[in-house]
Amino acid sequence: LNVRQAPSTSAAIVTYYNGGQSFTYDSKIEANGYLWVSYMSYSGVRRYVAIKNLSNGTTYGYDSNNFSFNGTPVTSNNNPSSTPAVPQGNKGQQVVALARQQIGKPYVWGATGPNSFDCSGLVQYVYRQVGVNLPRTTTQQEYCGHAVSFNNLQPGDLMFWGKYGSAYHVGIYTGNGNVLFAPQPGQTVKEQPMRYYMPAFARRVL
């Protein structure tokens, strides 16, 4: 499956998906004789993949509704089966429970889940599952909500490293002095005591 800069078979190919791979899209359009699915890349640029020729009915992928690509689903954001079940409890508890479900998944720069994450992608993904839409990057997320002191932390608070206005890393406070985050390439999502890697400030968005 070719990934293009625009919904046209003459548009430049920027990457591709092999059989057995899957991706998540957020919209569908019909253009230039094809049905396209579209998603926003980690760099903030919209990409397009043709999954059906409208003139002859040939399909090139399988989404959870109609299409198949070597038997592997091309998952959609509006597919209930691709959305994790939200645990019971208040939103802070829900955030922590959902974040812990991601422990062990690899850090990949620019990844926003569900199989890999960077630090801000993990935060954005987990909060989205409880109905809170956060921006994509750490430097955007640090302006969300309001400041909270370390003496008043609650599960689900955002923890930042670096100076306010130029934070370089973000995680989720899970309670009892612990923080959960996607660390760096070669490592996986983990939870550990804050004292091992002390954040600089916290924000509350719930």
Image (tube, helix red, strand yellow):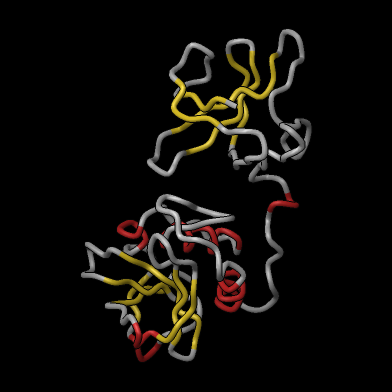
Residue located farthest toward the top when viewing the structure as drawn: 55
**Residue 37 falls in which quadrant of the image?**
top right
**Looking at the image, residue 92 lies above or below residue 117:** below
Left or right, 29 with respect to 66, comes to: left
Residue at x 37% of width, y 61% of height: 141
How many labels, in total? 0
Residue at x 33% of width, y 75% of height: 147
Left or right, 51 with respect to 165, comes to: right
Residue at x 46% of width, y 22% of height: 13
Which quarter of the figure is the N terminus placed in? top right
**Looking at the image, residue 162 lies above or below residue 39:** below
Residue at x 68% of width, y 55% of height: 83
Left or right, 125 with respect to 59, comes to: left
Viewer-nearest residue: 59 or 124: 59
Left or right, 39 with respect to 167, comes to: right
Q: Residue 151 in the image: x percent, y percent?
A: 36, 91
Q: Residue 178 in the image: x percent, y percent?
A: 45, 85
Q: Residue 79 in the image: x percent, y percent?
A: 72, 46
**Residue 77 falls in which quadrant of the image?**
top right
**Looking at the image, residue 28 lies above or below residue 11:** below
Q: Residue 87 in the image: x percent, y percent?
A: 69, 72
Viewer-nearest residue: 195 or 138: 195
